[in-house]
Image: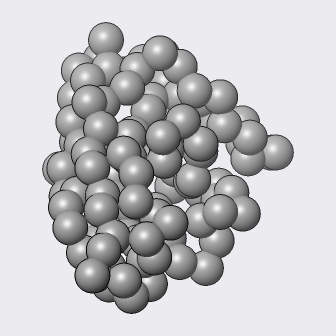
Amino acid sequence: QVRLVESGGGLVQPGGSLRLSCTVSGSHFSVNAIGWYRQRTLLAAISFGGNTTYKALAKGRFTISRDDASNTVYLQMNNLTPEDTAIYSCNGGLREYYSGSYTPMDFWGQGTQVTVSS
């Protein structure tokens, strides 16, 4: 059973930045990657081997990364706009090596609220 806990959300002004964290614990033999979602739209995914996938919505402003020592996957978000206001969640899933496609499994964190407002 994969357990995921997000943190790092909050209120930020337009043009600002936030870094979201997803701490992974438990047995994760059934997944090989972690994806970050806005609502239920995939933004980016990173495999346990470090290979990344970015959807168009995230390219250029968002960066996904991982820290193996702390079992944490990060989503760095820059130049935020009010349209980025949403609940962000991480998911445990499967990333296909050659195509980079990501398939979510039924492992979700509780989500973290991001609000972009002046």
- Rendered location of residue 24, percent (x, y): 26, 35
Residue farthest to the front, as pictured = 118
> Could you tell whether 83 is left or right of 26 in the image?
right
- Residue 57, above or below 40: below
Number of numbered discs overlaid on the protein picture:
0
Residue farthest to the top, as pictured = 1
Q: Which residue is drawn at 36% across and 45% down?
A: 87
- Residue 98, above or below 25: below
> Could you tell whether 4 is left or right of 50 in the image?
left
Residue farthest to the right, as pictured = 99
> Could you tell whether 84 is left or right of 99 in the image?
left
| Quarter containing the N terminus | top left
- Rendered location of residue 17, percent (x, y): 32, 79
| Quarter containing the C terminus | bottom left
Residue sitting nearer the eye, 64 or 50: 64
- Rendered location of residue 31, percent (x, y): 49, 24
Quadrant of the rendered structure where residue 3 is? top left
Q: Which residue is drawn at 20% across and 67% down?
A: 11
Q: Residue at x 59, y 42 (%)?
A: 41
For the question of whether residue 71 can be seen, the reply is no
- Residue 18, above or below 115: below
Residue sitting nearer the eye, 60 or 88: 88
Q: Which residue is drawn at 59% across and 65% down?
A: 58
- Rendered location of residue 94, percent (x, y): 60, 29
**Color style of the picture:** one colour
> Could you tell whether 57 is left or right of 89 in the image?
right
For the question of whether residue 91 can be seen, the reply is yes
